[in-house]
Amino acid sequence: MLTSLKIRNFKAWKDTGEVRLAPLTVIFGTNSAGKSSLGHLLLALKQTALATDRKRALHLGDPNTLIDLGTFQDCLYGHNLEADLEFELGWDLPKLMTIRDLHKKKMPYVGNALSLNAHLKTSKKEQPEMRGFIYNLRSNSESVLSVNHSINGGGKWKLSSDNYSFVPSVGRQWDLTEPEKFYRVSETSLSRYQNAGFLTQFALSTERMLSGISYLGPLRDHPRRTYQWSGDTPEDVGQKGEYAISAILAAEDDSRKLNRGKKKLNKPFAEFIANWLIEMGVIHSFVVRPVAAGRKEFEVLIRTQAWSPEVKITDVGFGVSQVLPALVQAFYCPPNSTVWMEQPEIHLHPQVQSVLADVFISAVKSYQNETPRNVQLIIESHSEHFLTRLQRRIAEGEIEPKDVAVYFCRNTKNGAILESLDLDLFGEINNWPEDFFGDQMGDLAARTKAALNRKRERQQR
């Protein structure tokens, strides 16, 4: 689970400062303020980790990747090729990491969290080029082991640490080589030392963290009359929710069961999702079944009211097909993973938008096979109703303020700014930004004044 994010000189962001990421993180803000750019960077990092080319410091994308960010100049704040791109990610480890130095008899380095700070500049070919990175193994926020892999003043790569002594290999001391991608010390460089092998653990942890990030965009596929599924297990529901039905079928085939929290009733995956749709008030019943025995074509049948006929998902309101991928992804994603969603409330009635907050609270608290899923949701939203319900649930004690982070994003002449909203135990926001959801009081005052003027004019006729 990601715990922090910091970005410098990326798209609208000159400097985000350190951003705390909670199990449920919600980002509001004006249009084109830079909210989506935060998720875009994470997708670029993920596709870089997945790429086969280890020499590419940052894979900006192409038509076949998760995201296409264009050129490196397009990505830099102000399109300034002289600006260096820096980012820092912090994440909790699913289990303790233990590092032992076989050359020294001392206590091992043990941590439950890891952070990576990477620094890139523009190469002569105007491509992203590594300047260095720093790993920091932490235990309860305290640093226990820090490793710096960067270029020194003479233009040579070095490996150093304030609290770990790297022992050179016997024989001639060859120069180190540049890192692989933005996070991995090369095998050649590791071979220059007798006790640097543990750095592969850091790289593997980075890859596991990035592989656990999924994204659901604001534009989702239109519903279909039939869906094909031949037994595969999709990684996620897809950026447009195109694999949502396949995910339901795969989870059912795997006999996956979920509940809404500790000691609550376990239910099969499809029934669990259907119950949320029913609670939202958008359907009365929901079922996915094959069009005929032995076929790989499936249809989604919905009954909107108890007295209504059962119809295909294409024949009911558009909102059902749009919210379904959000529900499925929130509970289908693997344990200890992060889901980034843009506008899950799109095409939904205000009351349904409110219930979405309950869905996502349940998702971060849910258990699978009696084990906490530890899922993280980062939500971009414009919904006042979503926020109001979230505040209510905090006040009722359904979720603790520490497990929620709410931000307001706005653009200024000095770059985008992310304001942290202070939520207390009573669900109150103690630092409301100006015009957070528009000028409601201004509209009310203007409407009242206009109504009085209209009445006065009618009386004078």
Image: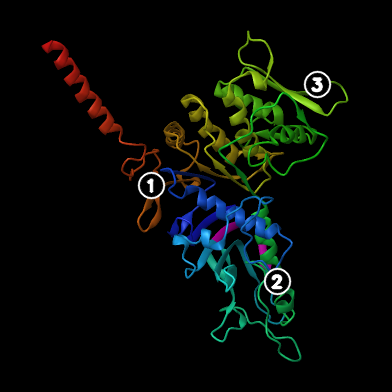
Q: Which residue is mark 2?
A: 198
Q: Identify the main secondary structure in magenta.
A: strand
Q: Which residue is mark 1?
A: 422
Q: Position of residue 231 (x, y in %)?
A: 82, 36
Residue at x 68% of width, y 65% of height? 203
Report if the CB atoms under discs 1 and 2 are less than 8 Å apart. Answer: no
Q: Earlier in the sequence, mark 3 or mark 1?
A: 3
Reply above or below: 310 against 408. above
Q: Which residue is mark 3?
A: 291
Is residue 25 or residue 461 the one in the foreground? 461
Indicate left or right for 78 with 262 as reference.
left
Reply above or below: 238 against 172. above
Q: Amino acid at mark 1?
A: Asp
Alpha-carbon span between mark 3 and mark 1 = 51 Å
- Where are the magenta residues, as a range? 89-98
Residue at x 76% of width, y 91% of height? 171
As helix, strand or loop, the secondary structure at mark 3 comes to: loop
Residue at x 66% of width, y 22% of height? 314
Q: Position of residue 446 (x, y in %)?
A: 23, 28
Q: Is residue 425 magenta?
A: no
Q: Position of residue 331 (x, y in %)?
A: 65, 37
Q: Amino acid at mark 3?
A: Val
Q: Position of residue 40 (x, y in %)?
A: 56, 52
Q: Earlier in the sequence, mark 2 or mark 3?
A: 2
